[in-house]
Image (spheres, grey):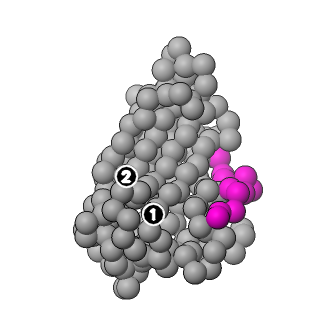
């Protein structure tokens, strides 16, 4: 169904407190099937390209715990190909939650409005969240989804996901 996320495709910049997840550092459902996804070579910065799927499910988690009481933001860098299809009635959602039992924060993304060939960060303004002081589990679990419409869709490129500390 999907290849396991490669921890070697996740980078952390200690100076900025920024995590960068290359496509192979994410769990992308159906990514191991070349009928559905074209994946970049290991160790490269190329995007994962969605050819066609009925449901979109991309997930990740920080390999280390986030700092309690700190504010963070999640975003995905995406673009659409010339042959994009199926997004008109299929809003996508970005989700972030701290801890497996944490409360999820959601942002709705209308991919039909993304200009073809233009790289952009979604959600606009990023999905911001805070790590509770009393959190037992401070691992971030996040995802990019379209699970409801059931129709075929394609033409989405995932360049990276970023989790970064927000300044005070």
Which residue is found at the position 45% from the left and 63% from the top?
55
Side (left or right) of 41 relative to 136: right
| Residue on which the image places disc 2 | 93
Q: Are marks 2 and 1 in contact (CB under 8 Å)?
A: no
Label 2 vs label 1, nearer the camera: 1
Name the secondary structure under disc 1.
loop
- Mark 1 neighbour class, 10 Å CA radius: few under 14, some 14 to 19, many 20 or more: some
Numbered range of the magenta stretch = 1-13
Q: Is residue 25 above or below residue 154?
A: above
- Report if residue 3 lies within the magenta region: yes
| Residue on which the image places disc 1 | 55
In the rendered image, which quarter contains the N terminus? bottom right
Residue 12 image label:
none
Residue 167 at least partly seen: no
Q: Is residue 62 above or below residue 32?
A: above
Q: Which of these two is toward me, 77 or 57?
A: 57
Residue 16 found in image quarter: top right
Residue 110 found in image quarter: bottom left
Q: Position of residue 118 (x, y in %)?
A: 36, 74
Q: Position of residue 18 (x, y in %)?
A: 56, 45
Q: Which of these two is toward me, 7 or 103?
A: 103
């Amino acid at each position: 169904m999907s290849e396991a996320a490669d921890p070697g495709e996740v980078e952390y910049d200690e100076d900025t407190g920024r995590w960068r997840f290359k496509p192979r550092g994410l769990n992308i459902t159906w990514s191991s099937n070349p009928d559905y996804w074209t994946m970049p070579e290991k160790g490269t910065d190329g995007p994962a390209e969605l050819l066609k799927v009925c449901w979109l499910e991309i997930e990740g988690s920080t390999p280390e715990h986030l700092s309690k009481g700190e504010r963070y933001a999640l975003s995905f860098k995406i673009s659409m190909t010339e042959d994009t299809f199926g997004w008109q009635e299929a809003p996508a959602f970005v989700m972030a939650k701290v801890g497996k039992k944490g409360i999820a924060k959601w942002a709705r993304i209308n991919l039909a409005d993304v200009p073809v060939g233009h790289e952009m960060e979604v959600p606009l303004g990023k999905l911001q969240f805070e790590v509770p002081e009393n959190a037992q589990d401070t691992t971030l679990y996040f995802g990019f989804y379209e699970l409801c419409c059931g129709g075929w869709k394609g033409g989405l490129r995932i360049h990276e996901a970023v989790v970064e500390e927000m300044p005070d």
